[in-house]
Image: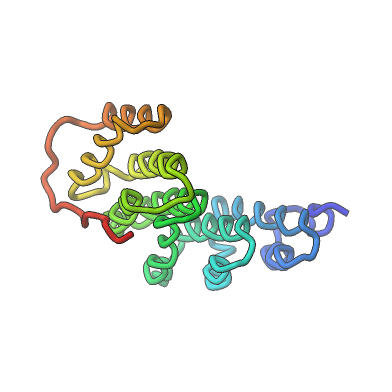
Amino acid sequence: MTAKTKMGRPGTCPTALIEGIGSKTAAVRFESAKTLVRMSETEPELLYPHFDLFLAMLDHENSILRWNAAQVLAGLASVDSEEKIEAALDKYLSPICGPEMIAAATAMQGAARIALAKPRLAGRLAAAILWVRNAKYKTAECRNVAIGHAIVSLGQFFHLLAGQDAAVAFVTAQLENPRPATRKKAEAFLKARSRQSTVGSRPPSGSRC
């Protein structure tokens, strides 16, 4: 029996999907989680009542379910009338410091989505993405990959930052990154940005890690 057959048509029953992520069958667990991620993008209001459950899943023993939970939470920011995501930001963003590169990338991608949903948090989220400068991952190459994700994520909400100098300085430094793909991301970021100085306060330096 497939996950789709067991749960019915994906996107219609959040409760069944949430039950599915606790299934003993891996295929059901992961199909349920993927469907919940999609639902958070298209029908976040249906999942918002379960916000606390997804927040708790950030501590799940299974890394894939942790990553999926982070994606769902980012999607719920658009309907977060109770400001729950702001209260959970320290926990949500902590993977950026390492050691798990995929978890860090997921958190940075989520940070961009949260910033677009809640622009007033953009400076705080950008500062957290800049933690990648001092983060410790399993290898140097993992760090360079994570930096590439940081550049892309910053680019998605750069226009919302009151002070952009710290982000520009970070990206400019990556023009000499040893990973070609990351260098290209830095080049694309800077090419898309105006050369004019931005008036505004500089966001925090992002040196937490």
Task: Give the vertical position of 33 relative to 141 (above or below).
Answer: below
Residue 111 in the image, given as x and y percentages of width and height: 40, 53
Residue in front for this viewpoint, 102 or 119: 102
Identify the image quadrant of the N terminus: bottom right
Colouring convention used in this rendered image of the protein: rainbow
Residue 163 in the image, given as x and y percentages of width and height: 18, 49
Task: Give the vertical position of 107 relative to 187 (above or below).
Answer: below
Quadrant location of residue 165?
top left
Q: Is residue 94 among the parts visible in the rendering?
A: yes
Which residue is at a point 16% across and 30% down the rendered structure image?
195
Query: Is residue 173 found left or right of 39 in the rendered image?
Result: left
Residue in front for this viewpoint, 145 or 157: 145
Which residue is at a point 53% across and 73% down the rendered structure image?
52
Which residue is at a point 34% across and 33% down the rendered structure image?
177
Task: Count every numbered label the image shows and give the total.
Answer: 0
Residue 134 in the image, given as x and y percentages of width and height: 32, 52
Query: Is residue 68 found left or right of 140 in the rendered image?
Result: right
Residue 209 in the image, given as x and y percentages of width and height: 33, 59
Which residue is at a point 25% across and 44% down the rendered structure image?
167
Give the farthest residue toward the front. Answer: 139
Q: Is residue 81 among the parts visible in the rendering?
A: no
